[in-house]
Amino acid sequence: MKLTPEILAKAITEYRNEGSELMYRLGKKFGYDINIQEEYEEFISRSNSKVPRSGKLSERVNYSFHGGECAFHKRKTQQNIEVILINPPKFGKIDTWFLKEFLDSTNEYKELSSDLDWQDLKPILLELYRTGQVEEIK
């Protein structure tokens, strides 16, 4: 079986939902409501001493802010989810490098993505945007 546009659209939905949920939980852990723009901006600020740049969200999930992203790593499943820190609280901007990491680390998709390079995902993603199967978030 190969990675079809329909399967990739499903994976993107899961990726976005999981990323949004993890960011919400991380904000809540440190007392921030990421739905409130001012709180979100303070939460992600590099100068915010109340929020370590990396650590444990829970016993099962690590996080690490880096550049304009926040990486989440689920220790039990080894799944990786990267959240690009724009468009809160929905987030959802897709970077094909990070999407490939998610696919390769998710049991449901890893066999389908193993023969693909991250650059192979770009034309499929652009087609999903063009046809409206996936909303493009900039």
Image (spheres, rainbow, N blue to C red):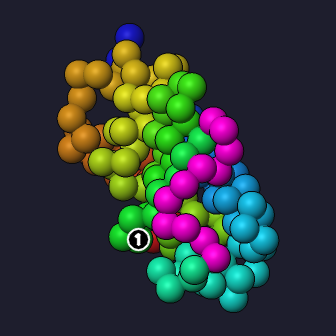
How many numbered circles does the render carry? 1
Q: Amino acid at mark 1?
A: Gly
**Residue 110 can be seen, yes or no:** yes
Q: Which quadrant holds the C terminus?
A: bottom left
Viewer-side residue, 134 vs 130: 134
Residue in front for this viewpoint, 85 or 59: 59
Residue in the image at 55% along x and 36% along y = 74
Q: Which residue is mark 1?
A: 68
Let me know if residue 127 appears in the view: no
| Image quadrant where residue 94 sits | bottom left
Compared with residue 89, is residue 134 higher up or lower down, i.e. above or below?
above
Question: Horizontally, is 45 left or right of 111 in the view?
Answer: right
Give the magenta part as a residue range.
50-60
Looking at the image, residue 115 lies above or below residue 47: above
Residue at the image point whose x is 54% and y is 54% from the top: 55
Q: In this rendering, would 65 be left or right of 118?
A: right
Residue 9 in magenta stretch: no
Residue 57 falls inside the magenta stretch: yes
